[in-house]
Image (spheres, grey):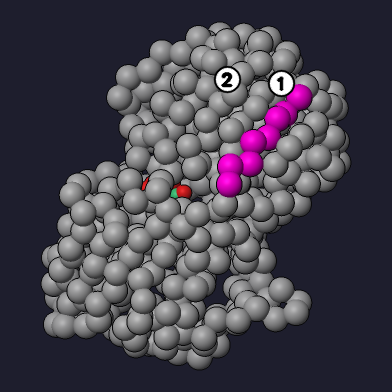
């Protein structure tokens, strides 16, 4: 959806203790991929535990527009009747991906090697984000694109009629770019290769293999080399989506910073390409444990238990860890503000092209709440004020960014004075039950 209605301000007050169990929704990255690969398989894929947030619902709508049948039954299971690789039909209207960079970028890749034309748009946040990182590699397959200046949406893609396979070195660590190239490679003859210097989330590779594609990953001196053989017949799957570690990050962090808290967050996907935040929090001295570790549906899973931790220390986060926690820097910067000493986050310039410029959004909001910040293009440094030490008492701009809104609401639960966000509406894109879930744990959230 390209707009979520009038702004919904929300205020978080010092709360706690937060206690109980937090059942967070399904993984957003895996949910998008289930719908897209289900639409490209021949036959019926079922998906249990799909994230029913606006971003994913927009991808479901898009898959219908490309010809797949996508329905939800009364038990909440999603059914996708796919059209097969190369079987997308031309949408008869503009595809609106709402707030979702993952949705639009993966879908552009998926249609780029089929001889159809599609026009994409999104909300004000998505229309401001760069699409050149997708249009550059899909041009190598033979697709053409016509967008606004700076490679912005709205944008029309004309899929290649006679696609050729591609060997592509991703210029930035991005699972979206890698995945778009692999999805485009599905309908190209021969072998498509993606090389990434730093490993990013590998859900596409795992799921493509699960659907029966021939795909290999090899660690070579030049980086991670992923090789996909084109034009497979994808076999439909029964997918159980693990719960989202990026959503779990919010109740976990809120428990760590809010006095007296003890919260269990069960069944969280702990794929090592996603779990960097939890490693970092433990290095800072968080009382965070993994219970009941197991493997489900090919992904490692555990129950997370987080207890209030009043002696967390700032650290230097290793830059090479960034891809495995890229969406978690906003909430980490909140934990950092309530720890002692400084937390240094380097190698994070990709944060500037997320749903908002997340370095700027966190820096300005934290400063307004009384926290000292240093930043440059690629770095964010937070000077911690210790447990309970952040003054708060400000209104922070969410900038159409769900993770910024949730981060500042968590800050308000532990700051001395209330913290308001100007618009909590974007939270519905990834974590529609955030507010009732946090209230059940004991959070004092008002408005919205
Ligand atoms: C995602 C990849 C990441 C992440 C986004 C989800 C994905 O983006 O920030 O929330 O599902 O592939 P980049 O590929 O831009 O790093």
Q: Is residue 39 visible?
A: no
Badge 2: few (under 14), some or many (20 or more) residues near its Cα, within 10 Å? Answer: many
Residue 144: give its label.
none
Q: Residue 352, image x and y in percent?
A: 36, 34
Q: Nearer the viewer, residue 260 or 401?
A: 401
Residue 418: give its label.
1
Q: State which mark lies toward you, 1 or 2.
A: 1
Q: Nearer the viewer, residue 172 or 297?
A: 172
Q: Residue 379, image x and y in percent?
A: 36, 22
What residue appears at the point 65 percent right and 16 percent down from the top-left corner?
Answer: 392
Image quadrant where residue 97 sits: bottom left
Q: Residue 35, image x and y in percent?
A: 50, 73
| 255 relative to 216, above or below | above
Locate the C terminus by quadrant: top right
Q: Nearer the viewer, residue 19 or 53?
A: 53
Image quadrant where residue 311 sits: top right
* Stretch in magenta: 6-13
For residue 414: magenta?
no
- The residue that mark 2 highlights is 336
Image quadrant where residue 15 sits: top right
């Amino acid at each position: 959806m390209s707009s979520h209605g009038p702004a919904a301000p929300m205020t978080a007050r010092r709360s706690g203790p937060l206690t109980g169990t937090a059942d967070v929704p399904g993984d957003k990255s895996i949910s998008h991929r289930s719908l897209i690969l289900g639409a490209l398989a021949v036959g019926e894929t079922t998906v249990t535990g799909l994230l029913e947030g606006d971003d994913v619902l927009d991808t479901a709508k898009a898959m219908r527009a490309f010809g797949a049948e996508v329905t939800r039954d009364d038990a909440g299971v999603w059914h996708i009747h796919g059209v097969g690789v190369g079987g997308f039909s031309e949408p008869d209207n503009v595809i609106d991906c709402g707030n979702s960079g993952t949705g639009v970028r993966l879908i552009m890749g998926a249609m780029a090697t089929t001889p159809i034309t599609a026009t994409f748009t999104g909300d004000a946040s998505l229309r401001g984000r760069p699409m050149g990182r997708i249009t550059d590699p899909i041009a190598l397959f033979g697709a053409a694109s016509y967008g606004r200046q700076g490679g912005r949406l709205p944008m029309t893609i004309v899929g290649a009629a006679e696609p050729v396979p591609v060997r592509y070195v991703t210029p930035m660590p991005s699972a979206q770019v890698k995945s778009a190239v692999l999805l485009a490679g599905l309908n190209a003859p021969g072998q498509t290769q993606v090389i990434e210097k730093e490993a990013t989330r590998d859900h596409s590779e795992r799921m493509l293999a699960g659907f029966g594609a021939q795909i290999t990953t090899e660690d070579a001196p030049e980086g991670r080399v992923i090789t996909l053989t084109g034009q497979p017949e994808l076999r439909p799957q029964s997918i159980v989506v693990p719960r989202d570690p990026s959503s779990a990050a919010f109740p976990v962090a809120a428990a760590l910073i809010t006095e007296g808290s003890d919260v269990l967050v069960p069944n969280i996907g702990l794929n090592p390409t996603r779990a960097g935040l939890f490693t970092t929090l433990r290095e800072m001295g968080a009382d965070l444990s993994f219970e009941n570790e197991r493997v489900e549906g090919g992904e490692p899973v555990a129950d997370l238990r987080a207890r209030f931790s009043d002696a967390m220390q700032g650290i230097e986060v290793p830059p090479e860890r960034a891809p495995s926690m890229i969406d978690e820097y906003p909430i980490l910067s909140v934990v950092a503000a309530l720890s002692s000493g400084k937390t240094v986050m380097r190698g994070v310039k990709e944060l500037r092209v997320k749903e908002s410029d997340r370095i700027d959004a966190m820096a300005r909001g934290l400063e307004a709440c009384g926290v000292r910040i240093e930043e440059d293009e690629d770095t964010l440094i937070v000077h911690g004020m210790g447990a309970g030490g952040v003054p708060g008492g400000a209104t922070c701009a969410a900038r159409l960014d769900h993770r910024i809104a949730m981060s500042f609401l968590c800050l308000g639960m532990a700051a001395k004075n209330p913290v308001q966000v100007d618009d909590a509406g974007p939270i519905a894109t990834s974590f529609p039950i955030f507010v009732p879930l946090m209230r059940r744990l004991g959070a004092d959230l008002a408005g919205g």
